[in-house]
Image (cartoon, helix red, strand yellow):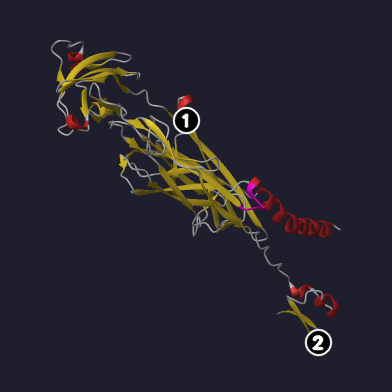
Amino acid sequence: MRWKMDGLKIWILLVISPILLAGCRQTDVKLRTTAGVESFRNAGDRIEIFYVIQNTTTDDQPFTKVWVNGEILEGVQIENWAEYTGSWIYTVTEEDVAKGRAKITTGVKVGWYDGSRNTDNSDSHSVVIPQESSAKLILEIRSAIWMFDSVNYTFVVTNIGAVNIPGPIVIQNNLNLNLNINQFNPTECHLLSDGLSSGREVVCTVTSGIPPDAAARGYFFITFTANAGSETSEKVTKSIFKYGAVVPTLTPTPTATPTSTPTAIVEVSPALRLDISSPSNYFSEVGNPVDFTYVVTNSGDVVIDGDFIIFSENLYSWECPQVAELAVSESLTCEGRYWIESADIGKPLTHHASVQGVYDGTSVTSPEASVTVAYLKPTPAPLKVNCSLYDTEQACGNHPNACTWDSMEQLCLKK
């Protein structure tokens, strides 16, 4: 009787132990992330996020599928206790700027076959990047008066940032005209050589000549920036006209207006055109990336200043070349990406977008363009049938696509 009880114990251990071990088996993925910068300054700044994915399973199974932020990493397999490193780009949003920090989360999902079934697991990790307490230089043209063969400008230069800006601060223009301190009204120009403390503003009056061809025409355009080392203000463009001349006007569409006497009206038509295409012919599942290509063309008759910004409701990230300006008929190409959400499944995705540039300090926005990407219903995986389990011709015949009955051997064989 004792032998029988010991035999029963041995049988229980042999049968139950693998089940208990499988239940205790640790199948896990670990994710660590770091940022390539310690701080950011403005919306649109790009932050590279580096990640390390570690396979910490205890059953010697490799991760055969790896997704990062919903995008599968083609050809990547992570062996047991091995690591995989990579990176992706995060673009700072206006919301991040408003909060003064960016919380950037990276998500990873992995899949593997544990010997009996397909299994998956996931992890996420976040880093918080603060906004740099930076200086910010603002330039304003308070007045510009054309008198005889010179122009008097009054500038206001302000540091609205949280740190001091060391001098010298230099005001430059795109026409390379020399700016001389007005001896009759020098105001505070000399303070620019010492820099600006946080919150300080300086008023400076200077005098310049006029471009050689402006006298006969009666007007000209000039663009200024204030510069201090790596700090540069935004461009400020001013229309300067001679006393008695008609102010150049900016109209959306040139129209001929009959007049009894010639005038000095200049009509320009700043315009942008956006063409969208998608190399992604279709999508099938949530998390599929859909890429877009944007071709931005200056379709007007004047130069359009950058930076160029893509606007769209269904766009997770985009990137345009950082160009100062776009000449007439010139084009540039931008790239964007969207990740499919559950609400997109079952119907085509129509993507709408527009692009914005600047002319003479005023925004120029293209008409909205669109492109449609098809939805393709996923093909279900074929059913795997173990034909050897069926020991009668009738049972084997229930799976005609996978099995065939061998009447001689009386076996159900795989086709």
> Across the whole image, how many numbered discs are drawn on residues?
2
In the displayed image of the protein, which residue is found farthest to the front? 260
Q: In this view, does 238 lie to the left or right of 74?
A: left
In the drawing, what numbered circle is on residue 94? 1
Residue ID at (64%, 50%): 25
Between 177 and 373, the one nearer to me in the picture: 177
| Magenta highlight: main SS | loop
Question: Residue 194: image x %, image y %?
Answer: 19, 16
Q: Earlier in the sequence, mark 2 or mark 1?
A: 1
Residue ID at (83%, 75%): 395
**Is residue 59 in view?**
no
Between 140 and 230, the one nearer to me in the picture: 140
Residue ID at (79%, 89%): 408
Q: Is residue 103 left or right of residue 155?
A: right
Question: In 3D space, how far apart are the residues under numbered discs 2 and 1 (Cα atoms)?
Answer: 74 Å
Q: Is residue 79 left or right of residue 191?
A: right
Quarter containing the C terminus: bottom right
Question: Residue 111: image x %, image y %?
Answer: 59, 54
**Whether residue 232 is situated above or below residue 381 in the rendered picture:** above
In the drawing, what numbered circle is on residue 82? none
**Is residue 361 in view?**
yes
Which region shows up in magenta?
A: 344-348
In the drawing, what numbered circle is on residue 407? 2
Residue 345 lies in the magenta-colored region: yes
Between 402 and 314, the one nearer to me in the picture: 314
Q: Disc 1 marks which amino acid?
A: Glu
Q: Residues within 10 Å of mark 1 (few under 14, many from 20)?
A: few
Element carrying mark 2: loop
Element carrying mark 1: helix
**Quadrant position of residue 250:** top left
**Quadrant position of residue 365:** top left
